[in-house]
């Protein structure tokens, strides 16, 4: 009995299974026939739309700036050297590295003993020369008086000879008296000649005395200069550097003991390319005195100064390119020679220009603008300047239009785009995934 019940149950389950298999086969057959009977449907194709960021530039007047890196230099740097040899007997209290001095201040004194002795001897020699000059002048006066007296005697002897000859002609005089008068006249003339020689010697003595006096004056001036050379003074106000002496040290002539730097006469030297140099000259080729701004970054602080372009280097060294420009700073007390700074030069203003991101300009010299139906158009532009991450272009056909800020190889004329809003900019990856899913959705649903 038990076996009969199990046999009937198994038979029932087998019949149910065969019925389900038959129903599934029938359902599958009907589905295949229905699919085969339907017309093949073509999936709907959707145009790919790119998301782009755009800006709407407006034409205006922009002042371009040129940025370079330079080095601070001093226009006045003086090597302080010892003009005389000797021991330094005195040093100014501020004669140290970084010491500040004023114009004319005594910086150092070299032992002046020898120079003072030479000066005393020169003064004595000058006094002797002046005494000799005065004595020569008195001797000249005496020589002139002596010559005048001898000339008077010669005139008297001449008149005496004439009188004796007159007497002899009247028969009163004698020949002996005439000869005696002639002899006296000859003696008087010889005396006059001797007086003239004495006068010439006195005049020569005057010239020699004057020469000796002039030579003594020169020697005195030289001695005074030698004494002055024992004093080392500041030629201008500034700061000392490279100080290498102390009090008591023996220095030689022309030895450098320090350097004096004028911190108020500062220049900044910076190099520009040939293209940048072309923006700094006028129509005549002369360098324009354009204003410059200098900045020294010192950690959290930023030190600034202003000035103007003053000159350019006369020649380039071998292997150099561009131009070396020098700008004079107006007032930069916090900057020191040797500082490396950033230099910003203001160029002449440009009118009717727009500023665009540098990424908006393609290698073909054109930008992409949004046209009708949000499709891209290629717009050629004229590049005027590059300003860091921006470019300045002639306004022309781009002013007031929506310009794509970032060009990529996937973008080109005729493509349809949608503007990327600021909210969407923060989830750009999500937008890309959504677009990809939207493009694939029709295929999956088909």
Image: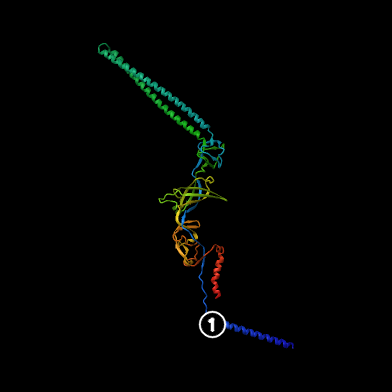
187 left or right, relative to 380: left
Q: Position of residue 333 (x, y in %)?
A: 53, 45
The answer to whether 246 is drawn above or below residue 313 in the figure is: above
Tell me, what colour scheme is on the image? rainbow
Residue 426 left/right relative to 397: right
Residue at 49% over, 32% down: 224
Q: Look at 51% across and 30% down and name the residue there.
A: 117
Q: Number of callouts in the render?
A: 1
Q: Residue furthest top?
A: 172
In the rendered image, residue 30, in percent from the top left (x then y), is placed at: 58, 83
Which residue occupies the foreground of this view, 105 or 301?
Answer: 301
Which residue bears the numbered disc 1? 37
Q: Quadrant of the N terminus?
A: bottom right
Q: Position of residue 330 (x, y in %)?
A: 49, 45
User: Does residue 9 appear left or right of residue 264 in this picture?
Assistant: right
Badge 1: residue crowd in 10 Å (few <14, some 14–19, many ≥20)? few
Residue 136: x and y in percent read 41, 24
Could you say which is closer to the camera, residue 405 or residue 149?
405
Q: Is 33 drawn above or below residue 218 in the view shown?
A: below
- The quadrant in which the C terminus is found is bottom right
- Compare residues 50 and 272 and report the one nearer the observer: 50
Q: Please say if 269 is above or below 151.
A: below
Residue extending farthest to the right is 1
The answer to whether residue 187 shows anywhere in this view is: no
Quadrant of residue 209 within the rendered picture:
top left
Q: Secondary structure at mark 1?
A: helix
Q: Is residue 433 left or right of residue 212?
A: right
Instruction: Relative to 209, say whether 307 is above or below.
Output: below
Whether residue 291 can be seen here: yes
């Amino acid at each position: 009995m038990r076996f009969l019940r199990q046999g009937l149950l198994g038979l029932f389950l087998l019949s149910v299974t065969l019925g389900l298999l038959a129903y599934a086969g029938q359902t599958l057959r009907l589905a295949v026939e229905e699919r085969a009977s339907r017309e093949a449907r073509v999936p709907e194709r959707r145009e790919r739309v790119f998301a782009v960021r755009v800006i709407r530039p407006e034409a205006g007047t922009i002042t371009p700036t040129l940025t370079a890196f330079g080095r601070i230099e001093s226009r006045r740097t003086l090597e302080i050297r010892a003009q005389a040899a000797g021991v330094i007997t005195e040093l100014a209290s501020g004669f140290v590295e970084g010491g500040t001095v004023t114009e004319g201040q005594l910086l150092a004194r070299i032992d002046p003993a020898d120079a003072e002795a030479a000066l005393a001897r020169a003064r004595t020699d000058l006094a002797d020369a002046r005494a000799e000059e005065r004595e020569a002048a008195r001797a000249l006066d005496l020589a002139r008086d002596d010559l005048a007296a001898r000339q008077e005697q010669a005139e008297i002897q001449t008149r005496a000879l004439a009188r004796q000859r007159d007497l002899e002609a009247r028969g009163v005089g004698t020949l002996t008296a005439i000869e005696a008068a002639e002899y006296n006249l000859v003696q008087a003339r010889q005396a006059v000649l001797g007086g003239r020689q004495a006068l010439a010697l006195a005049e020569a003595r005057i010239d020699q005395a004057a020469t000796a006096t002039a030579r003594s004056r020169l020697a005195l001036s030289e001695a005074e200069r030698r004494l002055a050379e024992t004093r080392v003074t500041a030629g201008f106000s500034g700061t000392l550097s490279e100080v290498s002496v102390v009090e008591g040290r023996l220095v030689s002539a022309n030895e450098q003991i320090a350097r004096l730097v004028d911190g108020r006469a500062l220049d900044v030297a910076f190099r520009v390319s040939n293209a940048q140099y072309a923006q700094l000259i006028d129509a005549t080729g002369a360098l324009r005195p354009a204003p410059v701004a200098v900045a020294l970054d010192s950690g959290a602080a930023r030190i600034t100064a202003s000035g103007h372009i003053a000159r350019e280097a006369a020649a380039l060294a071998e292997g150099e390119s561009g131009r070396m420009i020098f700008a004079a700073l107006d007032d930069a007390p916090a900057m020191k020679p040797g500082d490396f700074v950033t230099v910003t030069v203001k160029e002449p203003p440009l009118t009717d220009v727009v500023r665009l991101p540098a990424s908006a300009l393609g290698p073909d010299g054109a930008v992409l603008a949004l046209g009708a139906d949000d499709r891209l158009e290629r717009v050629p532009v004229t590049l005027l300047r590059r300003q860091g991450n921006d470019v300045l272009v002639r306004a022309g056909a781009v002013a007031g239009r929506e310009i794509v800020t970032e060009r990529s190889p996937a973008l080109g004329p005729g493509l349809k785009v949608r503007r990327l809003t600021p909210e969407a900019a923060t989830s750009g990856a999500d937008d890309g995934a959504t677009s990809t899913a939207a493009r694939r959705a029709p295929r999956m649903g088909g």
